Amino acid sequence: MKRMIFIVTLIAATFAYQSSSAQAFEKGGKYINVNLGAAQMWHMGGTYFDGWNGGYFGYSPITGQLGLQMEFGVHEYVGVGFTTGVGFGAGLGSYYYRGFWGRTGYAFQPEVNIPMGAFANFHFYQLIADKTGKDIHADKLDIYAGLNVGTGPAILLPRNSSNTHVSALFFIGPQVGIRYYFNDKVSINGELGYGKSFFNAGVTFKL
């Protein structure tokens, strides 16, 4: 009986130690984010022409984004990864009409885009926890900052023409983010920044 109690106590202590030593971010970890957000990305070659009828220019819409990110822990406090997704929106762009009289104005035009990029994050909350030795819940909370850059196609869908126009996106900017883990594998997340998104929120799966 005493031996059984000792074994149970040892197993419980082992699991307790593993739980207390768990980290929200760690070297060798793999993290998948599925997010919803909004972004405004620069369009290279974003002018759309429609022959005699004129065209649109100065086009850079704010779009809703469904994003997918994969991050790899390459250091105790550093992660790198890639981001992709799909965006939908309608932006206000200038236009001109090359008819007999000629005129200019503004119009909303729908767009679909597929951003693809890379990012790096510094997970400083884990560093603070390690250096101070204090229990600040770094096993559940992950706070980080980083940079992102990327490109991808943007498809402008003119309402008054059968022609579509494809331009190239370009985005670059900083981000700050937070994850809170409900268990060892699943967390909610949120980010603010510029480039790949103004803001986004969603779910993170730790592999």
Image (tube, helix red, strand yellow):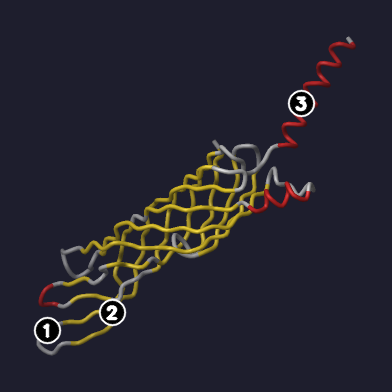
Front-most of 174 and 203? 174
- Farthest residue to the right: give it: 2
- Please name which of the two marks, 3 or 2, marks the residue nearer to the observer: 3
Q: Mark 1: which amino acid?
A: Gly
How many numbered marks appear? 3
Q: Which residue is mark 1?
A: 99
**x, y (%) of residue 24?**
64, 43
Residue behind mark 2: 94
Above or below, 40 against 115 in this view is: below
Amino acid type indicated by mark 2? Ser
The residue singled out by tag 3 in the image is 14
Which secondary structure lies at badge 3? helix
Q: For the residue marked with disc 3, what is the amino acid?
A: Thr
Could you say which quadrant of the image residue 89 lies in? bottom left
**Mark 1 burial class by Cα count in 10 Å: few <14, some 14-19, many 20+:** few
Tell me the residue at 61%/41% (across/down): 26
Q: Dot 1: what SS? A: loop
Circles 1 and 3: CB atoms closer than 8 Å: no
Task: From the image, state whether disc 1 or disc 3 is nearer to you.
Answer: 3
Mark toward the start of the polypeptide (2 vs 1):
2
Q: Position of residue 15 (x, y in %)?
A: 74, 28
Q: Earlier in the sequence, mark 3 or mark 2?
A: 3
User: Residue 67's spot in the image, x, y percent?
Assistant: 44, 52
Q: Residue at x 24, y 64 (%)?
A: 157
Of label 1 and label 3, which has the lower sequence position? 3
